Image (tube, helix red, strand yellow):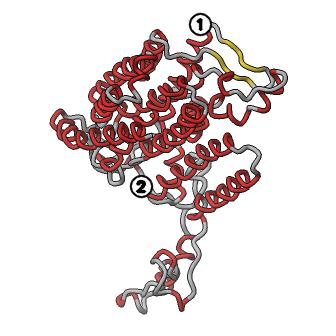
Amino acid sequence: MRDYLLTLCVTAAVTYLLTGPVRKFAIATGAMPEIRARDVHREPTPRLGGIAMFFGLCAGLLVADHLQNLNSVFEQSNEPRALLSGAALIWLIGVLDDKFELDALIKLGAQMISAGVMVAQGLTILWLPIPGVGTVALTPWQGTLLTVALVVLTINAVNFVDGLDGLAAGMVCIAAAAFFLYAYRLWYGYTIEAAAPATLFAAILMGMCLGFLPHNMHPARIFMGDSGSMLIGLILAASAISITGQVDPDALKIFEGSTRQATHAALPVFIPLVLPLTIIAIPMADLVLAIVRRTWKGQSPFAADRGHLHHRLLEIGHSHSRAVLIMYFWSALIAFGTLAYSVHSTSMWIVLGVVALSAIGLVLLLLPRFTPRAPRWAQSVVPPRYRRRKPAVAPAEAVGSADADEPAESAGDGDAAEEEREPVPAGVNGATAIGHRSRFSDRSKAGARG
């Protein structure tokens, strides 16, 4: 564990220290695109944060190669070299996209080629434990197709969720932490050496995200761009592929009786193996909803819009920071809830705890829908948004005029004013239909800021 923590800290330190110079480089090269209609930030912000993250990856792999307890990962497996090859390719495409805005199909092709490069060097899915059937060996073509599909889905899921300051880096860091704990348990608890590469990948991924987050939290000074989002998505997918396709389920030594009975008994242990996408359930759900929404409108699945989950949280009424924290909460609940269930599936307290936390998360999610007003005696101790609004005083020159009643009617208390607002028209995006007010101005009238 000490060597893994050292690798994590070195990766985080290199990423953190390089992000500042990379920001200056991005500004000097003009990698600061104009504000788009779907963007939340209001000032041009440099991209290319993925450059610092990639060098953090290289530093982490280099340090791990010189550590006595981790050097065997490089000697016994070709997976670290496969990861570095695929990461370098997808990173170069991301850098070009951050600067020149490449076509979506070009990026999709690069993602598939990067996955193919890793498959050619041995980082592929060899078998799958299927409940009710047992361990199913995959043919080379089946393993290649499944590996490429998993890499492409994970990269795009992370890329789609990268819409708020610190959101993608934080969610991937949470997923990597949960995956690290599970992989380390297999490597250390069951002495399965095949789980060591996945453990190393998860530790390095955590370091990359932790080193970049201080520069990316709201208000962000730099964005990771596609060079960063596609990179961390590929590393996350590589970790899942390594532990799913390379770890032999028989090595867990938990099979008793028939194959079917053994698979049912081992199902909780296989949950993070069979369903590695549970650790990125929120980004994957956002990806599926975006594809369905855009296809339903007759648009390309890669057409950008403002209907993502984080956009909907802002439309409901959450602040930028609160929306990010809510996404963190749900990601951690799903990832660590699945991890806890895989370890102690017979404990009912885990299920009850997940249900209770889900209820709390639902209340926090819908909190802007309910704006309680504090009683008069507590007005001085509660935040301003919970205080009762005082009725506006009519201007002196309006007293005695024929329209004297209008100011009192239109400038009454806040509740009456809100009732007078124009209702949301039918047919708008589902996010705006949740509440009666929007946090965003009309982008078409915002000029350069739109």
Seen at 51% across and 23% down, the residue is: 151
User: Could you say which is closer to the camera, residue 65 or residue 12?
Assistant: 65
Q: Quadrant of residue 72?
A: top left
Seen at 52% across and 81% down, the residue is: 413
Apparent side of residue 308 relative to residue 262 in the rendered image (left or right): left
- Give the residue type at disc 2: Ser
Q: Secondary structure at mark 1?
A: helix
Seen at 69% across and 21% down, the residue is: 250
Is residue 418 in sight in this rendering?
A: yes
Residue 340 in picture, x, y percent from top left: 64, 45
Residue 232 in picture, x, y percent from top left: 42, 32
Residue 342 in picture, x, y percent from top left: 67, 40
Is residue 106 in sight in this rendering?
A: no
Say whether disc 2 or disc 1 marks the residue closer to the N-terminus: 1
Res. 311 mark: none
Q: Quadrant of residue 96?
A: top left
Seen at 32% across and 50% down, the residue is: 214
Res. 441 mark: 2
Residue 253 in picture, x, y percent from top left: 70, 27
Res. 140 mark: 1
Residue 389, compared with residue 268, is above or below; it is: below
Residue 329, compared with residue 401, is above or below; it is: above
**Tag nearer the camera, 2 or 1:** 1
Apparent side of residue 212 relative to residue 318 in the rendered image (left or right): left
User: Could you say which is closer to the camera, residue 197 or residue 316?
Assistant: 197
Apparent side of residue 263 relative to residue 292 in the rendered image (left or right): right
